[in-house]
Amino acid sequence: MHHRRLFTAAAAAALILSLTPSTAATAAPDATPYYWNVDGPASALTALADSGIDVAHTEADGSAVVVADTATANGLKAQGLDVSFVDTVYKPVPPGAQAADTYYGGYHTTTAHETHLTQVATSYPSLATVYDIGDSWLKTQGQGGHDIKAICITKKQAGDCALAPQSTKPRFSMIAQIHAREIATGEVAWKFIDLLTSGYGTNSRITALLDTTEIWIVPIANPDGVDIVAAGGNNPRLQRKNAHTGGGCTGTSIGVDLNRNSTFKWGGGGSSSSPCSEVYRGASAGSEPEVRALENWFKAIHPDQRGTSDTAPVPSNARDVMITLHSYGGYVVIPWGWTSADAPNDTTLRALGQDMADSNGYFVGNGPETVGYTSAGVTDDFTYGALGVASYTFEMGADFGTCGGFTPAYSCVNSTIWAGNRDALLTGAEAADSPYN
Ligand SMILES: [Zn+2]
């Protein structure tokens, strides 16, 4: 039995830095990640994230669930923290042939998504238009990378699907896999695109939606990150951030958290200035090309309907809805993320959130009410706070089990995650005309 010594945050940070990520990078046979519950002094738990430990979520009792290999978990235990095993990260992959450009039982690679968008636009020229909205970080460095792709889906009339904020039809926008390892989210975007295009003219609900509304989707908001994830094959690498190297970070601790890099209220609580943190906010607001591409695209398709004061409500006749897809927890998250104060449109944001939650069964609340903490620099604070779009984060899927966590078994996409969210997404899209009343 080790001698339990007085714990200090500084000591913890120093030890943790020496344990990871070098341990994970070199001890290949023991590098399998698991979910662990970690409890201890609040200051020590706070220090975990800045030290590069991967804090996946916080429990209601204040303890943390971290993703770590066994050696790292033992290191935390040796510091006097209470560490207990919770679940595996990787679920069994059924044997048998896997389609090209897929990983981990059927999840689609970035390349597969790009091909899919091109095929949809070719098959449904009267419905779909694909745009290149900017470059990934690796592409800006001349190191491969990707164009970030958006698809507009509507029954096209003259002037529809233009990159201009004033449009005849109201707009619903959706992005997925800005956190690359939240792999079910890109699949849900894929299936939503197929539902809309194949349903026009055959399904009355979808026909009515596409006759009246433009649906804009970025299925892979962080393509470089998804390449890293997919390279793990049946053991997807747990890359959350983009592929921006530097800061002495290695393995999946490289990169900037694209959901902490937005230009609205950048730099506050729930984001880190430590480059190896999973919530590293980047060197400056909008420093990352992926975030600039997304924000420029949002500004190009949604009119600015909001004043600049934090307390100025969006007018009740404003239009447009945005949903950003994340995993996990079972939440419909409304603004704000950056503060625990109510957003000026709290009541109406909550009401539409509940309309969507009536079908997916999720819990509705702002950041502190759902995930349990404030998060500055998030996507939906930008689209709501800067533009006045009624904006939501879906945290899709259960915490643990075969269909839970960051990497559910592929069969869960159809059976649970897509099935459970399809109608909620349609409800959100149908509200684009008047989300605030
Ligand atoms: Zn996420």
Image: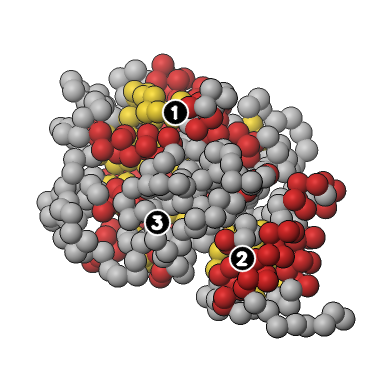
Q: Count neighbours of disc 2 (C-alpha within 10 A) and say few if under 14, some if 14 to 19, many if 20 or more.
A: many
- Image point 22% across, 50% down: which residue? 388
- What amino acid is found at the position of numbered circle 2 in the picture? Leu
Q: Which residue is disc 1 drawn over?
A: 135
Would you say residue 362 is visible in this rendering? no
Q: Which residue is disc 2 drawn over?
A: 48
Q: Is residue 238 left or right of residue 142?
A: right
- The foreground one among 81 and 400 is 81
Q: Position of residue 258 (x, y in %)?
A: 46, 45
- What amino acid is found at the position of numbered circle 3 in the picture? Gly
Q: Which residue is disc 3 drawn over?
A: 267
Q: Are circles 2 and 1 on residues that touch, CB within 8 Å?
A: no
- Image point 63% across, 37% down: which residue? 228
- The foreground one among 383 and 411 is 383
Name the image quarter holding the N terminus: bottom right
Name the image quarter holding the C terminus: bottom left
- The foreground one among 60 and 106 is 60
